[in-house]
Amino acid sequence: MQEKIKNGIKEALKKLEIDSGDIVLEHPEDFKNGDYSTNVAMVYAKEMKMKPVDLAEKIIAEIARLNSDNGVEGVEEIEIAGPGFINFFLSREFFAESVEEILKQKENFGKNNLFASKKVMVEYTDPNPFKPFHIGHLMTNAIGESVSRIFEFSGAKVTRANYQGDIGPHVAKAIFGLQKFGLPDKSLPISNQAQYIGECYSKGSNLYDTDDSAKKEIDEINKKLYEKSDEKINEIYNWGRKITLEAFEELYKLLGTKFDKYYFESEVSEIGKKIVFENLKKVEDPEDNRRIFEKSDGAVVFYGEKYDPKLHTRVFINSQGLPTYETKELGLTMLKFKKDNFFSKKLDLSIVTTAVEQAEYMKVVQKAISIMHPDLEKRMKHITHGMMRLESGKMSSRKGNVVTGESLINDAMDVVREKISGREFSEIEKQNIAKIVGISALKYSILKSSIGSDIIFDFEKSISFDGDSGPYLQYTAVRANSILGKAKDFNFKYEKEIPEETTSLEKMLYQFPEVVNRVYRELAPHYIATYLTELASAFNTFYANTKILDENNKYIVYHLELVNSFYQTMKNGLWLLGIETPERM
């Protein structure tokens, strides 16, 4: 409908000999001001040397001449408001047909073909073996999974990728800690062993910063890891890598993510190193502009500011001859685009999600890549997220421990268990509800804000069944599904009669495809979260004011269709956020 009205306006402007650009068409906050509104008359009034109201009248007249239905099928009325806004009111028939269309399309409602047949790889989560799964990994997981689903909803073939640092100083610090403090009891659950490895990493990291002897030993371990020259170190490495990767898989399953492709620093390191040296300026010809890397104090660097004053210099090979994160990122990108046979056709878009502190370094790496491969410049996109803090301001869990992503997940599930402890559910149901609702609380808290924003996480507010939370959306969906379940045993005559008055719920439902379209164009999942919250509010108002399952309700068939269309739209929207819709709550 949005495009139909825009085209009608463009045709009218064309008749008035106005060369228009993009037409801004918005939904008024108050439905009394129409279903769509545009300021186009105010935009072009000065150019036409007319008052905006007068130009608005001419635009409306031209739209009306297009055909007998005010120029746009489904538009019942067009009016001028204020200084020259043009407001469009949609017909009763349009809303009734929209409900039918939702029920017809079901899980496909809202889908589009904006990226049909394209190949997209979304890289996200990226936890490092030997280190804890921290809150940042939780944030990039929620964002990356939602972005993956947005592209799938838009017709793309999406591959979920996970890039993990299984080599480097952090591994050496963890192995040093394991050698010093001993290995864990291998009969313990995987998650407990992984937690112990993370603690050894923290201890090793602290000693690296405070003890020169430990620092020297850790640097030596790091070198041996790259060389694979020490059998005992290799044995600890292989065991620790396996344990932490298995622990991560348990978390991915909880979060509802299944990766298609795994990349590791150990496999991309040599690829990146080779590319750097192939593009290193030769001593005898330092002005050779075909090569972009240069030697500096025993290291190999890229002078980003030479190509863009907003960039800076980054080291790609350090003075010890070891590749840095930048070189590994270079090798990873080349593996994705040039050397990976996972796709039958070329990769059209590579999206990487990381914390915001990696933004500047990624800009430098992507600039280096785009100089070597100009065709990749528009096929690489970097999404960054902000920081998450607890409402108390202290980064400690409910049990008094330092907050990791895993502890936050467990704490969220514990809070849900407390809330439903008195309800008549089996223990298995309680565990399942705690998992589904606890994860939704976390994901919604992350996704309701624009990507890049810092987040304040409040346990009570995020897990509330009322208001701005994931559980509130789930609870409203469950309520709608409950009505549909009860209707199966309700005796009523199947004769559909449509009420004359249009509800706010109907005025919200048809907007879902437009919201999905905007989310795709801007890669901004928070628009889905905002829309679903407003949609749930509209449903609850409808539910409070309507006796649906009532033998005297002559609109019962249509009302049940409306409830069903709401439930389907909510499920589709929650899926885009990576949130599961439970059967009961």
Image (cartoon, helix red, strand yellow):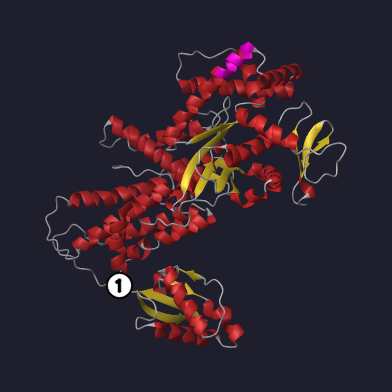
**Looking at the image, which residue sits at the far front?**
344
Is there any visible trace of residue 33 in the rendered image?
yes
The quadrant of the rendering that contains the N terminus is bottom left
Q: Main secondary structure of the magenta part?
A: helix
Which quadrant of the structure image shows residue 315? top right
Which quadrant of the structure image shows residue 218? top right
| Residue 227 position within the rendered picture, expressed as x and y whole percent measured from the top left | 68, 19
Front position in the image: 80 or 362? 362
| Residue 94 position within the rendered picture, expressed as x and y whole percent measured from the top left | 32, 70
Residue sitting at x 76%, y 27%: 321
- Secondary structure of the residue carrying numbered label 1: helix
Query: Could you tell me how many numbered marks the image carries?
Result: 1
| Residue 569 position within the rendered picture, expressed as x and y whole percent measured from the top left | 35, 55
| Residue 407 position within the rendered picture, expressed as x and y whole percent measured from the top left | 49, 31
Residue sitting at x 35%, y 54%: 108
**Looking at the image, which residue sits at the far right?**
284
Residue holding disc 1: 92
* Magenta stretch bounds: 231-238
The quadrant of the rendering that contains the C terminus is top left
Front position in the image: 133 or 227? 227
On whether residue 415 falls in the magenta region, the answer is: no
Which quadrant of the structure image shows residue 437? top left
On whether residue 233 falls in the magenta region, the answer is: yes
Q: Amino acid at mark 1?
A: Arg
Left/right of residue 160 with respect to residue 91 in the rendered view: right
Is there any visible trace of residue 84 in the rendered image?
no
